[in-house]
């Protein structure tokens, strides 16, 4: 699928942000992004109702959706379940792509789409993003490295390639259920770890290079 053919819905609600930056990045590579409020997918909207089937890619942007009350991404996820639950499951089963960064990643965890079930269904969270080990909001550029895996868009990127990313979050520590290390090893075996925090010298990414204390230095996941 070439960039110019990718129709992307960037899902917004109160408190999301960086959606315009995301749209600009997608346009830069020839995509066709639209920033669309979740209400436009509802059944009581006066304007034409939008449908997920119009799009190839659904993206959850960053921010502080619904003020991050309860916990980061929880209210956004609950509203998505109510408005889009069945359509989103069908979207995933059809093999269309769903992405999320920052608050969007937190929302995908809350929806149960990450690490994800084999049938692509929504469900209870299978992981948690806890407050950072530092106990406060972390905001600085830091490195993320591609460890290799099953994610097709990065399959030609050399394993170990690192990128300097802006990083800003208060609840980013990935915690996995079960005996220590067991679920992490399963994710590694499945090629589901998308990025790991990295140090610029290639050494262990101790704080501040791992800004939150995530298990296995995990910074991103695929299903």
Image: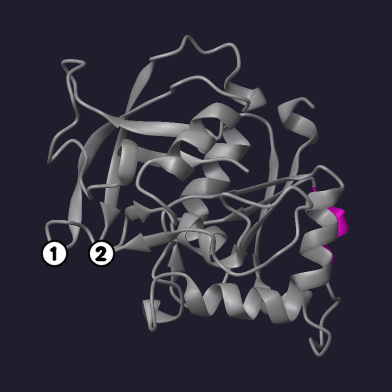
Whether residue 50 is visible, yes or no, is no
State the separation of the CA atoms marked 1 and 2. 6 Å
| Vertical relation: 25 (above or below) 124 | above
- Of residues 83 and 13, the one nearer the viewer is 83
Q: Position of residue 138 (x, y in %)?
A: 18, 54
Element under disc 2? loop
Residue 76 lies in magenta, yes or no? no
Residue 52 lies in magenta, yes or no? yes
Is the N terminus in the top left, top right, bottom left or bottom right quadrant?
A: top right
Residue marked by disc 2: 131
181 with respect to 109 (left or right): left
Q: Position of residue 50 (x, y in %)?
A: 82, 69
What is the magenta range?
A: 51-55
| Vertical relation: 151 (above or below) 220 | above
Residue shown at 87% from the left, 57% from the top: 53
| Colour option used | one colour
In the orientation shown, which residue stands out farthest toward the front?
A: 179
Q: Kindly indicate whether the residue at mark 2 contacts the one at mark 1 (C-beta within 8 angstroms).
A: yes
Residue marked by disc 1: 135
Is the C terminus in the top left, top right, bottom left or bottom right quadrant?
A: top right
| Vertical relation: 193 (above or below) 114 | above
Residue shown at 23% from the left, 35% from the top: 142
């Amino acid at each position: 699928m070439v960039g110019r053919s990718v129709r992307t819905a960037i899902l917004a609600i109160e408190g999301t942000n960086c959606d315009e930056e995301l749209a600009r990045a997608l346009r830069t590579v020839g995509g066709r992004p639209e920033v669309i409020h979740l209400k436009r997918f509802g059944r009581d909207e006066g304007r034409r109702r939008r449908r997920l089937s119009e799009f190839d890619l659904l993206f959850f942007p960053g921010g502080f959706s619904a003020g991050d009350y309860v916990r980061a991404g929880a209210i956004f996820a609950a509203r998505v379940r109510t408005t889009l639950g069945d359509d989103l499951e069908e979207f995933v089963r059809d093999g269309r792509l769903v992405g999320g960064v920052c608050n969007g990643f937190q929302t995908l965890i809350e929806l149960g789409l990450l690490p994800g079930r084999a049938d692509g269904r929504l469900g209870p969270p299978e992981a948690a993003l806890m407050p950072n080990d530092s106990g406060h909001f972390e905001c600085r550029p830091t490195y993320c490295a591609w460890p290799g895996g099953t994610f097709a868009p990065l399959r030609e990127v050399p394993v170990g390639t690192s990128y300097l990313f802006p990083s800003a979050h208060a609840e980013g520590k990935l915690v996995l259920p079960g005996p220590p290390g067991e679920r992490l090893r399963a994710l590694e075996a499945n090629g589901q770890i998308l990025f790991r925090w990295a140090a610029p010298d290639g050494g262990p990414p101790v704080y501040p290079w791992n800004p939150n204390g995530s298990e296995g230095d995990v910074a991103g996941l695929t299903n």
